[in-house]
Image: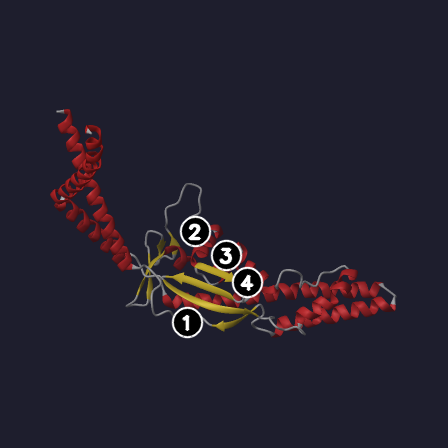
Amino acid sequence: MTNMQNEMNQPMTHEQDDEIDLLELLKTLWQGKWLIIASTLLSAAIAVAVALNMPNIYQSKVLLAPADAGSAGGLSAMAAQMGGLASLAGISLGGGSADKSDIAIEIGKSRQFVTGFIRSHQLEVPLMAATKWDKQSGQLVIDSNLYDVQQKKWVREVKEGASVEPTDWELYKAFSELMALDKDKKSGLATLSIDFYSPLLTKQWADWFVHDLNQAVRERDQVEARKNIDYLHKQQAQTALASMQTVFSQLVEQQTKTLMLAEVQQEYAFKTIDPAVVPEEKLKPKRALIVALGTLAGGFIGILLVLVRSQLRQRKQAQA
């Protein structure tokens, strides 16, 4: 009988202990309320200061479609029909598993193209030395510790043996963090986005990038087509077979069409579906979110400090 009473009392004792612990916890937090409030307010103030000092970042987007999409009777179809003949002649007409737009995207992401794009448009200073955009003047704010605007030279501190002027690798890394070029596998459409401090420059850089990318792919195909035509003429002159003469003539015609298309078509790799515009709203930072998260973090830190302080006091009292 006595054992049964003890067993019945045990759950009640656990519940009472839980209630006592909860009350003690609330009491401890109440006693340390000023520390929690101070930590929350301090963290909120820091979050506000950080959010206000962070520069605005704007984004411009361009929606692109492959220039040869849907042209079944165009160049891609011709290349497929003449592929066997070209193989006999010992040349490649392209048009294999890799689509021209896929190749263009890889070119656009390549270090050689990106650094060439930056150098040709003289984007080194805004890319590497700008800290924010002044909305009133419409100009970028350049860090004087990195670049001297008056003397037009780089003054940044670098490790011994390193270049004061930004290297191609540094420029490539910096621009790659701002630019995104991806293709949707389902729709086949590509999207170019550029993020930067200045809304005007994001739009301008996006336009330049699409133009230069089309130009790079066009020049690449022009060089390849001219080499193929020269090679075919040489092979045609060396053979006396009428059947092979016909083959070479057809291949020359196909390569000539490729060359003509590259010279005439401006949007050679991509056609612009939705052009870039000057963004009116910033992409980031999300200042309200930063302040909210900072305030919550300060509250949690305050609660943690109060609990740790309470535990330390209890240990000191137990040791005494």
Q: Secondary structure at mark 4?
A: loop
Task: Name the residue at 33% across, 68% down.
Answer: 281
Going by the numbered disc 4, the residue's amino acid type is: Lys
Judging by the rendered image, the residue that carries numbered circle 4 is: 185
> Dot 4, how many residues are within 10 Å of its Cα: few (below 14), some (14-19), or many (20+)?
few
User: Residue 197 placed where, x, y %?
Assistant: 36, 62
At label 1, the amino acid type is: Val
Label 1 Cα neighbours within 10 Å, binned few <14 / some 14-19 / many ≥20: some
Place of residue 200 in the rendered image (x, y in percent of width and height, measured from the top left): 38, 68
Secondary structure at badge 3 equals: helix
Closest to the camera, between mark 4 and mark 2, is 4
Residue at mark 2: 165
Badge nearest the viewer, 3 or 4: 4
Residue name at image x 60 percent, y 74 percent: 265
Which is closer to the viewer, label 2 or label 3?
3
How far apart are the alpha carbons under marks 3 and 1?
24 Å
